[in-house]
Amino acid sequence: MNKPVSSDQDGIAGLLQGVRSFRNREYGDSDALMPRLAGGQQPKAMMIACADSRIDPALIFGTRPGDLFVVRVVANLVPPPDTDGLESAVLSAVEVGLQTLNIPHLIVCGHSQCAGVRTALNAALGNPVSDAQALRDWARVAEPACCEVIAEHGERVTENLARKAEQRLILDSLENLRARPWLTDLETRGKLTLHGWWFDIGTGDIWIADPKSGKFALA
């Protein structure tokens, strides 16, 4: 008699079925995309996005494999230089994208209901809610910006406060990218354009930061 399959096993089985479907769909024809991509990649944009399972850049932005070079980290943070090595994972990918692949656009894309930002907000208020040490160390990068938002808008974590913190941290990450002279040089010479986007999970709307004022407006 076969043993019942657990829900955990169902999840893995679904992933394996997914890759089989992907292979059949993307490798089956003589002009299929994936075999051609085996020779190399030339993405037109790079995105630093959150690790949140609800944020799938390829799905949200309608891209195909090879179109978008994506880095996903909690709260889409880019640490400033000299942050005890915390920046290495993100910056190593940024270097590949901008220096090796010469990608002309880099987008920092945050989102609503970000648990990583909530972690930083609560820590900034002196009420840490997570015992996960690595998460707390990472979220500490966001605390200065969260403290500024709290000082400007209040000391109670609300949806409005969280949204302002999420958007402020996008701008903060862009400035931390610009703290790398080689990257600023690319931007100054017109080889790179930086973008700040915020995705509303509840509505599907994208809000874009004005490059001069930093204010976000509906796309």
Image (cartoon, rainbow, N blue to C red):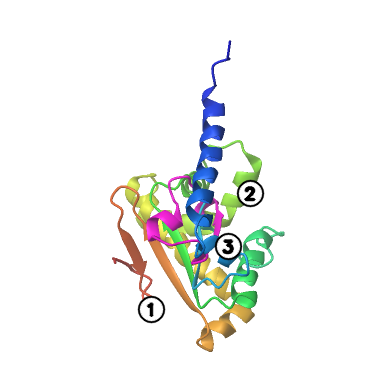
**Mark 3 element type:** helix
Query: Is the residue marked by circle 2 packed among few (<14), some (14-19), or many (20+) residues within 10 Å?
Result: few
Give the residue at x 32% y 51%.
Answer: 160
Quarter assignment of residue 87: bottom right
Is residue 51 placed above or below 6 in the rendered structure?
A: below
Mark 2 vs mark 1, CA separation in Å:
31 Å
Q: Earlier in the sequence, mark 1 or mark 3?
A: 3
The spot of residue 124 in percent (x, y) is 51, 49
Nearest-to-viewer mark from 1 and 3? 3
- Asked whether 150 or 139 is in front, the reply is 139
Q: What residue type is labelled 3?
A: Pro
Q: Earlier in the sequence, mark 2 or mark 1?
A: 2
Q: Mark 1 points at which residue?
A: 212
Q: Mark 3 points at which residue?
A: 35
Mark 3 vs mark 2, CA separation in Å:
41 Å
Q: Which amino acid does label 2 sit on?
A: Asp
209 to the left or right of 49: left
Query: Is the residue marked by circle 3 packed among few (<14), some (14-19), or many (20+) residues within 10 Å?
Result: some
Query: What are the residue bounds of the magenta stretch?
Result: 51-75
Q: Mark 2 points at which residue?
A: 137
| Residue that sits furthest to the top in the current view | 1
